[in-house]
Every structure is written in C-alpha cells, then in structure tokens.
Image: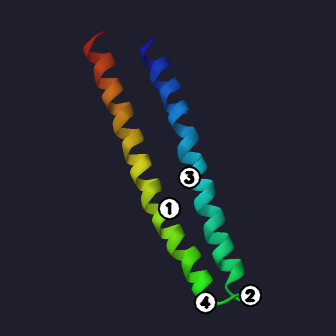
Amino acid sequence: VGGAGIFTLFMICLVPVLKIAVMLFFLRISAALIEPLTDKRISRLLSDMSEIVTLIFGMVLTVTVLFIICISIIVAATN
C-alpha cells in the first residue's frame, strides 16, 4: 500500500503543477508575441504576471514535494 499510495498522491499532486506550468508557458509566449504589436506596458504586464506565476509554481512544487516526503515518513513509521 505504501509505494502505490505515494505514487497515487504524486499523480494527484501532479495535475495542479502541470496546470500552473502550462499557464506560465502561455503567459510567456503571449508576452513575447504581443510585444511588437501593442504598447510596452501590456507586454510588461504579461511579463510581470509570468514572473508572479513562476513564484507560485515554485511554491506549489515545494509544497508538493514536502507533502510527499511527509506522507512517505508517516507510511514508513507506521509500517
């Protein structure tokens, strides 16, 4: 149950991480594509938003790793 449960938790936690990564990718692509077409303020806005989403991505990824480590320790301790 331990290894399969940890793998299942990993797969469940992977969905939000992938969603944030895709959103980050599209924000950066849209900032790069819109830069020559619009005002620099809009491009800078999208670029700043992508930096903020990068921070959120890092936080979610860190919490996910710590959650999996915590569950692994609990499973190992209560074997």
Query: What element does badge 4 sit on?
Result: helix
Q: Amino acid at mark 4?
A: Lys
Q: Earlier in the sequence, mark 4 or mark 3?
A: 3
Q: How is the image coloured?
A: rainbow
**Numbered circles on residues, count:** 4
Q: Which residue appears at 42% of the width and 16% of the height? A: 2
Q: Which residue appears at 70% of the width and 87% of the height? A: 38
Q: Are marks 2 and 3 in contact (CB under 8 Å)?
A: no
Marks 1 and 4, Cα distance to the nearest angstrom?
20 Å
Q: Are marks 1 and 2 in contact (CB under 8 Å)?
A: no
Q: Are marks 1 and 3 in contact (CB under 8 Å)?
A: yes
Q: Earlier in the sequence, mark 1 or mark 3?
A: 3
Image quarter of the N terminus: top left
Q: Quadrant of residue 15?
A: top right
Marks 4 and 2, Cα distance to the nearest angstrom?
9 Å
Residue 40 has which mark? 4
> Which residue corresponds to mark 3?
20
Residue 53 higher or lower than 77, as above or below: below
Q: Quadrant of residue 33?
A: bottom right
Q: Amino acid at mark 2?
A: Leu
Image quarter of the C terminus: top left
> Which residue corresponds to mark 1?
53
Q: Amino acid at mark 1?
A: Val
Image x and y of residue 4, in percent:
50, 18
Q: Earlier in the sequence, mark 2 or mark 3?
A: 3
Image x and y of residue 76, in percent:
30, 17
Marks 1 and 3, Cα distance to the nearest angstrom?
7 Å
Q: Are marks 4 and 3 in contact (CB under 8 Å)?
A: no
Marks 1 and 2, Cα distance to the nearest angstrom?
23 Å
> Which residue corresponds to mark 2?
37
Left or right: 13 as drawn, with respect to 73:
right
